[in-house]
Image: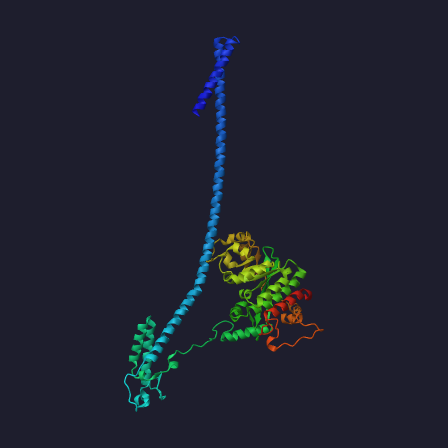
Amino acid sequence: MRLTSFFVAICMALIATSLGAALYFVAGFSGAESMMVAMVALTGLGLYNTMSARVRDRTDIAAQIADLSRGTADMGRQMAELGRRLAAAEVKVGTAVDMAVAAAKPVAAEIEELGALIKQLAETVALHDIALGSSPLAPTSPGTSDEAANPPGKSGSRLASKTGSNPGPDSTAKSTSASTSLSKSASKSTSGSTWASAARAAGTAAPDSARHRMNFAELEPEPEPAYTKLESGPFKGMERDDVSAMLLSAIEANRLDLYLQPMVTLPQRKVRFYEALTRLRTGEGAILTPTDFLPYAEEAGLMPRIDNLMLFRCVQVMRRLQAKNREIGMFCNVSASTLIDPEFFPQFSEFMDANRALAPSLVLEFTQAAYRSFGPMENESLAALAGRGFRFSMDNVTDLRLEPRDLGDRGFRFLKVPASLLLDRTGATVSDIHPADLSGLLLRFGVELVGEKIESEGVVVDLLDYDVKYGQGFLFSPPRPVRAEIMQAIPDRSEAASRALEPPKSEPAKPTPPETAPVLSPVAADARPPAAARAAGLGQLARSAPARS
């Protein structure tokens, strides 16, 4: 820069000098006039150079400021992306920790139960060791009988003589104390030498009873009763087998009722969906909610049969609703055990394939606990249903540790959260995101947020601030049974299936042995036919359902 400035100054001086010389020698100006003109020209050139340099400097500074602004903006975007990735990593880590803790709980329970079984096994082995290793302390003469050597008053209650003598009270106390000391020593020991020392200690504690043969049946602990009666709930005083038998009889007698509860848009309160709920009527006429009988139905393996019946009714009711208003949809609850049932799920899949036209309006609902317990088989079944266009919903949400991207990828389009959990007025909600931001986060992945269990107007106002689009609860309407005339128009599934597979009149039906007679509906009887016959029967039933409706 300095060399350039010197060169420019020399050039300006030469130009001014040349101009003055030209005026002096050519134009005939005087020396003073020529020098003055040369000075004016030199001053003008210096001013021009100075002004142009300032303009150039300003342009360069503006360009530098623009470059700096662009660099700052890029850095801000990179920091935002880094924060988003960090938040996603924290969510995944939290989910992995929860899954690990949930997977470790049953393992810990099994280890604890295994420890108790090992302790019982150790006690039993010690008792058997005593029985096999004990020998008479004093030999008896050949002519002396066992009864003479061991009178009835000296024999133990748990040790029986070869002649069948009756035990006395003194030896009973000694034998009991020996068994007690044996149990204590056996529970504290972990090696073979300790078992032997415990056996010797027990043998010396009961010298009178060691001469007799052990009765293993008397040494073994008394078995605990296999079934206990329930102490609370609607089945109080009943055994679990009796509850399972009662539920099975209710299913066979068609005492499962379909109830509908509306789901409305907020704030318009226009009915957009119905949720299908199950109610069970006992033989005495009492109405049981799903929370009363579903745990016992899951334990007895009856959920596929219940889902079979309720899904058939939901499809038929959905067809009647679609005939009046095609914007109405329905949520139908499905158990996780149904997805892996080897006999029912192929029929379930074929039935849903035949009713693929209802896919935009029929939503299959699963609980949060079932979703978290899904394995490879359940995920494959979900993918098969999602491939047919059906959507899913999650309810019974207990915490907001969720992964919206995973929900959207698996086909879940609705998330039903209790209003109390969403509003978090007690501050006890477990979540990785503030509940007010949950709706926007879910919408990015195509999942709608539904507030359920709404019972007051104040809750509705608060949910509107959280951008909740749908609401459900007793404030809008309690669950109501489907009208009798509608249910009468729906044929029983077993009867419809039987009509669907009824042989043509021109070809007489071949007799079938009783043990292989096809029973199409699991609601109709306990016996189950081969899977191929069941699948074919329900396929014909599904294809004939639109014509009947």
**340 lies left or right of 97:** right
Tell me the quarter of the picture where residue 340 sits.
Answer: bottom right
Q: Where is residue 483 shown, x and y percent of the image?
A: 64, 67
The residue lying furthest to the bottom in this view is 143
Q: Nearer the viewer, residue 251 or 429?
A: 251
Q: Residue at x 52, y 61 (%)?
A: 376
Tell me the quarter of the picture where residue 476 sits.
Answer: bottom right
Q: Quadrant of the N terminus?
A: top left
Q: Nearer the viewer, residue 405 or 513?
A: 513
Q: Residue at x 43, y 23 (%)?
A: 3
Check the image and report above or below for 242 versus 542: below
Q: How many marks?
A: 0
Check the image and report above or below for 505 versus 51: below
Q: Nearer the viewer, residue 331 or 35?
A: 35
**What colour-coding does the image apply?**
rainbow
Q: Residue at x 48, y 46 (%)?
A: 80
Q: Is residue 367 visible?
A: no
Q: Where is residue 211 shown, x and y percent of the image?
A: 31, 84
Check the image and report above or below for 460 versus 495: above
Tell me the quarter of the picture where residue 137 sits.
Answer: bottom left
Q: Quadrant of the C terminus?
A: bottom right
Q: Residue at x 35, y 87 (%)?
A: 162
Q: Where is residue 238 shown, x and y percent of the image?
A: 50, 75
